[in-house]
Amino acid sequence: MDENCCTNDFDISSEEAARLKEAFKDKKFLKLFQEYLEDVNSADSKQSYEEEIISLEKERGFEVKFIHPDPVYVMKFTENNGKIFINICKNQHVREPIFERKNAGTEWKIPVILSKPRQDVDKKKAKCTVLDVMFHPKAIEFAVKNSRFKGVVEDTARTTVKEKFGIDLSSQTAIYPKMKYKGKAPPVVLRKSLQSKKEEYVCEPIEDYMKNLLPKVVGTKHLVPLTKEPKYSIKYRDILDMKDYSLMGYTDRAAPKEIIIEVQLPQVQRATDVELDILERKLLLKSSPGVNHSYRLNLDLSYSIDTNEGTAKFDKTKKVLIISLPVKERGLPKEV
């Protein structure tokens, strides 16, 4: 069996199974797990979670790789049990194809990484099955240039799906719909012990992996996203007022009346998810305890502001916090 192929063998001890069962009774654990699943497809949070998980696993003696399918095209099959979609994808973590010349010709070995079959619906809202079959980019490149090699690639996909999941598509004719990918692309996890000299990885869906990982870190370490500075913009607003004028004209053309700061917080759900402190020449923002993000912003202000005034409003649609800070009274010139 190829080293890169997925396997369903992920053994856990009775102690770990009991810990898993108890963990799912913990409301805090369930909340953390649900928030992860809801947020795992967010581009802004995905990298932070993955880096944190990789770090945790390394401390426990394991190497982890997150595999994200890069869509190429779709093969559709129709069976008595319904439609089956195979997403042909590429990923650099799959081993390169190799060949061996024999008397009968050239024999190719084409490694793959499989995702676990998942349920979806077709255009008519009928249930269907979807799988991802990932190849090395060079295998896809060869397939694009050579129709015979493309046939070998597709035969490999069918054969591997049958071997791993018992889905026999050998007698079915493939249809190629005009789409690059069916459904949403879930990440796959490759995991192996750092003590193992062999390049043998256990491959499993992210949901199954998290069920095995989180119970072991609950109570010892919390899965906290890495702190990052959010994107922001600063605008200066000047509202003309009669008291800004004297016999000599406008008193201060440089200092604005108000500072408008817009902070982009794509992972924030509500205003209470962040804490905001305003000092005379500084703005401090950080994520509230217990949330599934970790923003931190320490911003020096160009002007002294009135700390007793000002407003902050969170736009839930745009995920932007808009902060309005009035600049301190500039006053009239000492001499007129």
Image (cartoon, rainbow, N blue to C red):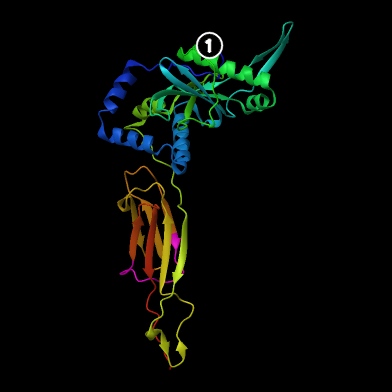
Residues 206 and 176: in front is 176
Residue in the picture at 45% in, 85% down? 251
Q: Which residues are magenta?
A: 299-310
Q: Position of residue 155 (x, y in %)?
A: 58, 15
The answer to whether residue 333 is visible is no
Snapshot quadrant of residue 117: top left
Snapshot quadrant of residue 111: top right
**Farthest front residue in view:** 124
Residues 235 and 282: in front is 235
Residue in the picture at 39% in, 46% down? 267
Magenta span dominant secondary structure:
loop
**Taking 176 as reference, is 172 above or below it?**
above
Numbered disc 1: secondary structure: loop
Image position of 38 (left or right of 228)? left
Residue in the picture at 42% in, 57% down? 263
Residues 254 and 163: in front is 163
Tag 1 residue? 171
The answer to whether residue 245 is visible is yes
Q: Residues within 10 Å of mark 1 (few under 14, many from 20)?
A: few
Residue in the picture at 61% in, 19% down? 153
Snapshot quadrant of residue 41: top left
Q: Position of residue 164 (x, y in %)?
A: 48, 14
* Total marks in image: 1
**Farthest top residue in view:** 103
**Taking 242 as reference, is 28 above or below it?**
above
Q: Quadrant of the C terminus?
A: bottom left
Image position of 201 (left or right of 34)? right
Q: Quadrant of the N terminus?
A: top right
Residues 171 and 163: in front is 171
**Taking 170 as reference, is 237 above or below it?**
below
Q: Position of residue 113 (x, y in %)?
A: 53, 22
Query: What type is the residue that disc 1 sits on?
Result: Ser
